[in-house]
Image: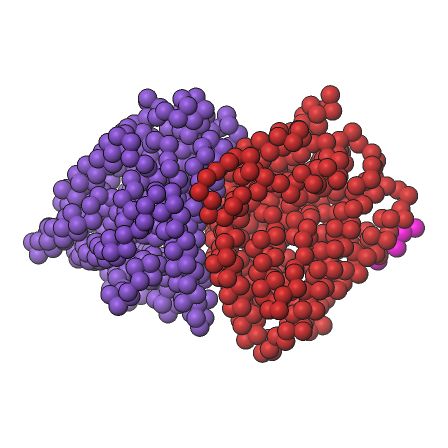
Amino acid sequence: MYPLRAKVNETYLKSVEAIQAGKPAVWAMLNFYYGDPVLKAMDVEVVYPENYGAIAAAMGVAREYLDRADAEGFPTHLCGYSLTTLGYASRMMKELKGQIPPEAPLGGMPKPLFLMSSAAICDARYKWFQALGRYMDAPVWPLEAPIPGIKEFFIEGYYGRMVKLGVKHLRDFVAFVEKMVGKKMDWDKLDKTANLMIEVNRVWHEINELRKVNPCPMHSRDFWSAMPAALFLAGDLEDSLRLYQDMYKEVKDRVNSHIGAVPNEKYRLVFAELPPWHSLSFFDKLAERGWNFVIESFGYHPPIPLDLSKVSDPLERITKFSLQFLVGYYEDARKQNVLGGTSAYPYLKYAKEWKCDGAILHPLISCRSASTHLPYVSDMLMEKLKVPSLSIEGDIVDLRLFNPEDALAKAEPFEESMEHYRKVRKQEGLDW
Amino acid sequence: MSDKSKGLNKAREIYSNNSQRARELKAAGKKIIGYPCVYVPLELLTALDLVPYRTCGDIKEPVTEADRALPHSFCPIMRNCLDCALKGKNDFLDGMVTIHSCDPQEKTARIWESYTNYPYFHFIDMPVTVRPEALEYFKSQLNDFRKTLEAFTGKKLPKDKLEAAIKSYNQQRTLVRELYELTKPSPPRISGTEIVQVVKALTSLPVSEGNDLLTEVIGEVKSRTDVPEKKLTRLLIWSSTLDDADIMQVFEDKANVVMNESCGGIRAYRAAVKSTYDPLEGLASYYLNEITCARTFRQATPGETGKDYARDLQSRFGYLKGIIRDWKISGAVMLLVRYCDPFAFEMPSLKDYFDSIGVPSTYIEYDYTTGALAPLRTRAEAFLETISQ
């Protein structure tokens, strides 16, 4: 798994070099596989301000950008990543006339050719790029991202209509990118890119399935390290596929040899949602107590595999793959009559199938979309599976809000709770 | 002595006890369907003889029950609405229709459906752009909504009934615009606080009763002698929701609020549903294109490959220029409900727009509680003092 992480880093630096050498760059939101293959097939360098916000926070330069965004009139309770980008854009465009700020970590983000936003998950992800129009003349393409209700999804013809929207929308997006980049789409390349994306994610899914065994061979930290190549399509996809295949073998070997990701796995946990990127060593302390994080972050997980080999139009294949990220869980959720949790239901599945003793929930003060469903997740895990949760507040850029010492102090009482509910589950006939 | 069962008094009465009429109709055998947002096409409910009832929040109600379902740092209006539902204040509802007008609406819909047990519950997905494929998808969403309502009521929806309902709601939109014409004089013939009460009353009445009420109110206001006191400033308030008279009164103590551009004011009434062969087409177009909420992504030209900030501002806020001219607005308040992301992202750009047309403006934030009234008053008075100098 470490070569994959190294490859992601290498890819990022290559991308920075290419952009610094004058190659046009696009700023993009995480879009759940929808727009990325189009940009990749068009050989466009992509930077993700969401990720850059996390980097700026971890490297201690976010504060200046947050202050600038505040001074520009953006309310401070907005998404921390967005405020970082808005402050960055203000500094770059108003103060430095388009030059990358010298203090910007990892080469910075150059002025983009255009912006690709996404309506998936939250309002911030398209309003934020719209707000950037105050600083730069880059046009924005907002990618639509339908979010059906769970029971509504099963109305006759619903899925087909979502696909129709997606394909038409993507076709227009391709035309937009062609105009912006000044070249035509290579449809064979897009076809190949789509297939590689799907296969990379299928292997990645299979790796995570291996984590169901006891002891779990792979920790959430390794998941978060390895996921960018599948989720953001970072790097060359053929390289990524090979590396994920290697990773599968590595994890499978660990399964066969009964090697756990932590020395003495005492508790199996699920983590929701975004990790404290700036304090990942926190998990090492918990590992010393035998806490193994065996599954995590629904929003970063690959879609449940779907056979799309008979879909000839790459745009339709991409659309169906992207939709699968969300609706892949709907049939199960409907059967379980868990109608309320588009983003919450997967945690029920995770806790049950990965046999978790507890859940760590990480509500984020400035990322409401990754936090809103967490009280419901907690309720649902207890009601249906007798799995207790521990909520630890934090933020995506304001490091002061996450207190690892305080969180660690809660570990022992939470262990008592997990022990208690093991007995309760047994009494109720649950098998872990 | 004025008749308490008519006009403004009646509106005030309904505003103060806004579920009363719905409860009466329920007792008389009608089915009442709740909705939390003005994006829900009420025409479809009315055409099937269902009574729409807007499930508003109540700033006087401390949120307690919703704490177990939603985090604190979340849209306070939706927290408050859900809290009221969980406390049984909407126990007369036969169903709920929710819509993906914004992230909090979408997220709360999931939770609402999980923690309640209405015989009918439907969620309408809504695109964020006004592109043709988005419009087509939204129309299909309205068609699905129609199908679920037909299944719930056991009745087919005839086209002529839907057209009649559209006509009634268009009449309501015309009447609300007519009401707002009465804020054009100086002093205005009706206060912003009174209009909040009237508009909120409309959302808890069947459309025909709402139209009757509006007709009475307009007649009364046109002939009244006790018009509101003239203040130094004619204010426009731009907000996601301003549906509480106490909040409006904070501003009206020192100004005449002649335009409430929020979904507690004129926003849902500024345009009309166009007549189309397929009525769903007209409805989809109206609800997606015409309601000027910040949740919709608007561009000077859809799919534009270049960007000009001035044109961009015009496409997003240009409609305000006519309002400012026609209502002789002398100051604008951008009133943000805390944690409302779609509106929060607009603040600096809208300020730029107001600056570009020479209207002094300020941004004020509050959290939809009575505790917010005092700080709100301080901020409002400071702004009004500044612009009156």
Residues A427 and B283: in front is B283
Q: Residue furthest left?
A: A257
The correct choice, above or below, for A302 with respect to A54 in the image is below
Q: How far across and down, in percent of the image, does residue B317 sit?
A: 60, 40
Left or right of B365 in this view: A358? left
Left or right of A264 in this view: A106? right
Q: How far across and down, in percent of the image, does residue B20 sit?
A: 72, 60
Identify the residue at horizontal 72%, vertical 66% (top origin): B24
Q: Quadrant of residue B225?
A: top right
Task: Work out whether residue A368 can be spotted.
Answer: no
Residues A385 and B364: in front is B364
Q: Quadrant of residue B96?
A: bottom right
Q: Quadrant of the N terminus of chain A?
A: top left
| Apparent colour of chain B | red
| Magenta span | B1-5
Residues A118 and A414: in front is A118
Left or right of B279 in this view: A245? left
Q: How far across and down, in percent of the image, does residue A44 sit?
A: 29, 42
Identify the residue at horizontal 68%, vertical 57% (top origin): B272
Q: Which chain is purple?
A: A
Identify the residue at horizontal 39%, vertical 26% (top origin): A98
Left or right of A221 in this view: B288? right
Q: How far across and down, in percent of the image, does residue A237 sit?
A: 20, 49
Q: Is residue A305 magenta?
A: no
Q: Quadrant of residue B188?
A: top right
The correct choice, above or below, for B49 with respect to B209 in the image is below
Residues A384 and B297: in front is B297
Q: Quadrant of the C terminus of chain A?
A: bottom left
